[in-house]
Image: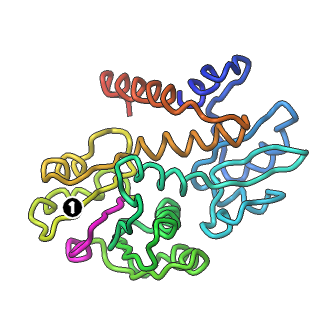
């Protein structure tokens, strides 16, 4: 809906954007089928990592984060980009977070690909040290490697209340439900976080978002990330400025429709 709204607003009525189910093993063949009439691809996990050896060139951010969520076909080449990082920066900026001042100390909940993007976004906002809370402290090897490439120091902590003490910004990259323990304690945290960024966008609001808002904490929802990373993809694929207002209206209408009919 976001891309379709953008193409319509830009007058690109002959452009189409549709979902393609593709497993890792099928990705090389899919890329080979993308001829000169293809502008690009948006990728979800695990394809963000599986695509890396199949690309001709990548922007430095892709190497730092270890993931490309966007492929652009240009000059008979496959170009890899990561719009998640700047999408996060813009989502936070829309709520006045990071605008001219460090948002930290910050904690990221989760250690997957989205957490790596969050690390890079915090680096871009001036942070040099971040706490990462994960369910299994022995497993976030990819995140630690990404932190080294990004140039940020991480402290790995267990995913439990004590890991949030003293944090001004909480970024939750875990699936819906995994952050519910934070929702139960956030009103009693002293000092309370100044902002909570939950990357989940449906169903919304999450228990964490509800509890944070009730406690007077600034809440950034996952739709803002979805919107801004898609806007950057539109700009890469069309070489035109993304019509963010039209995309926002279409996205919010679609989420409202899904909520009304109970769609997952």
Can you name the residue that lies furthest to the right here? 76
Please identify the quadrant where the C terminus is shown. top left
Secondary structure under tag 1 reads helix
Above/below status of 41 relative to 144: above
Total residue callouts:
1
Q: Tell me which segment is drawn in magenta.
A: 160-172
Residue 161 lies in magenta, yes or no?
yes
Residue 248, position in %: x, y? Answer: 45, 31
In the visual, does 145 lie left or right of 154? Answer: right
Residue 199, position in %: x, y? Answer: 39, 51
Coloring basis for residues: rainbow
Can you name the residue that lies furthest to the front here? 100
Can you name the residue that lies furthest to the left here? 188
What residue is shown at x 34% (from left), y 73% (from top)? Answer: 133
Query: Residue at label 1?
Result: 182
What residue is shown at x 63% (from left), y 61% (from top)? Answer: 67
What residue is shown at x 32% (from left), y 28% (from top)? Answer: 259
Residue 138 lies in magenta, yes or no?
no
Residue 185, position in %: x, y? Answer: 13, 63
In the visual, does 176 lie left or right of 14? Answer: left
What residue is shown at x 43% (from left), y 49% (from top)? Answer: 91
| Category of crowding for the residue at label 1, using alpha-carbon neighbours closer than 10 angstroms: few (below 14), some (14–19), many (at least 20) | many
């Amino acid at each position: 809906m976001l891309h379709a709204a953008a193409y319509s607003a830009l007058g690109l009525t002959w452009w189409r954007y549709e979902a393609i189910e593709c497993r890792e093993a099928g990705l090389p063949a899919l890329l080979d089928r993308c001829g000169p009439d293809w502008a690009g691809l948006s990728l979800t996990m695990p394809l963000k990592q599986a695509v890396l050896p199949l690309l001709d060139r990548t922007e430095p951010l892709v190497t730092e984060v270890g993931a490309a969520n966007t492929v652009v076909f240009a000059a008979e080449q496959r170009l890899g980009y990561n719009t998640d990082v700047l999408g996060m920066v813009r989502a936070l900026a829309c709520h006045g977070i990071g605008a001219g001042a460090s948002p930290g100390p910050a904690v990221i909940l989760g250690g997957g690909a989205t957490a790596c993007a969050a690390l890079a976004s915090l680096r871009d906002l001036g942070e040099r040290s971040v706490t990462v809370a994960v369910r299994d402290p022995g497993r976030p090897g990819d995140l630690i490697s990404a932190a080294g490439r990004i140039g940020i120091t991480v402290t790995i902590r267990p995913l439990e209340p004590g890991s949030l003490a003293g944090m001004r910004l909480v970024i939750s990259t875990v699936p819906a439900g995994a952050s519910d323990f934070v929702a139960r304690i956030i009103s009693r945290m002293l000092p309370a976080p100044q902002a909570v960024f939950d990357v989940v966008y449906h169903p919304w609001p999450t228990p964490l978002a509800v509890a944070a808002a009730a406690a007077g904490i600034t809440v950034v929802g996952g739709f803002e990330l979805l919107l801004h990373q898609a806007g950057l993809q539109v700009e890469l694929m069309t070489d035109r400025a993304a019509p963010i207002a039209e995309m926002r209206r279409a996205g919010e209408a679609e989420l409202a429709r899904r909520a009304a009919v109970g769609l997952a």
